[in-house]
Image (tube, helix red, strand yellow):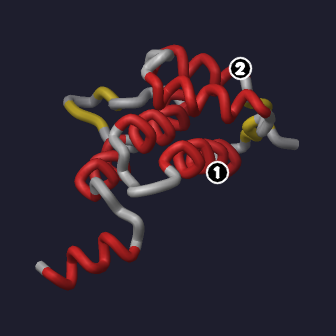
Amino acid sequence: MADSLYAEQTLNLHNPESLYYLVDAVPGSMYGREFFPSLFEKAAAYPWHIITRHIFNDGNKRTGMEACRVFLELNGYALRMDEGVIGIAMWVAEGKVTQEELVEWVKESSTPLG
């Protein structure tokens, strides 16, 4: 137990159970229905859950938006990285947008690569 607690603190993990949930849920499904059916829903799930569930002790907004960017890039899209990224991350943290609004923002802020 002590070793596990030390590892979590060293890794900046505040809420490891939420991280494990997120890793399983994004590609996950139940009864043949995906939890996050579209690419943009999957991409938005990362910042939404990282920011709202406070997975890390520090850096949740930065990490959430970077996870979204990397996921999109790995799937053939580029996320526009401008001041809007900071704004949407703040709005998510402050509860000023819904998860559905975040999905729309991700979709509108993404362009296919190449």
Q: Is residue 51 above or below residue 13?
A: above
Q: How many tags in the picture?
A: 2
Q: Is residue 114 left or right of residue 58?
A: right
In depth, the one of 23 and 63 nearer the eye is: 63
Spot occupied by residue 60 in the image (x, y as percentages of width and height): 48, 48
Label 1 to label 2: alpha-carbon separation: 16 Å
Spot occupied by residue 113 in the image (x, y as percentages of width and height): 82, 41
> Dot 1, crowdedness within 10 Å: few (<14), some or many (≥20)?
some
Give amino acid for label 2. Glu
Residue 83 falls in which quadrant of the image? top right
- Residue at the disc numbered 1: 70
Which of disc 2 and disc 1 is earlier in sequence? 1
Give amino acid for label 1. Val
Image quadrant holding the C terminus, namely top right
Q: Is residue 114 left or right of residue 33?
A: right
Image quadrant holding the N terminus, namely bottom left
Question: Mark 1: which secondary structure?
Answer: helix
Please name the residue shown 46% across and 25% down the image.
Answer: 94
Q: Residue furthest right?
A: 114
> Dot 2, crowdedness within 10 Å: few (<14), some or many (≥20)?
few
Please name the residue shown 52% across and 32% down the image.
Answer: 44
Identify the disc placed on residue 32. Answer: none
In depth, the one of 108 and 51 nearer the eye is: 51
Please name the residue shown 33% across and 71% down the image.
Answer: 9
Question: Mark 2: which secondary structure?
Answer: helix
In depth, the one of 100 and 29 nearer the eye is: 100
Q: Is residue 2 above or below residue 27?
A: below
Evaluate if marks 1 and 2 touch, with contact meaning CB atoms under 8 Å apart: no
Please name the residue shown 49% across and 16% down the image.
Answer: 96
Q: Residue furthest left?
A: 1
Spot occupied by residue 35 in the image (x, y as percentages of width and height): 34, 30
- Residue at the disc numbered 2: 108
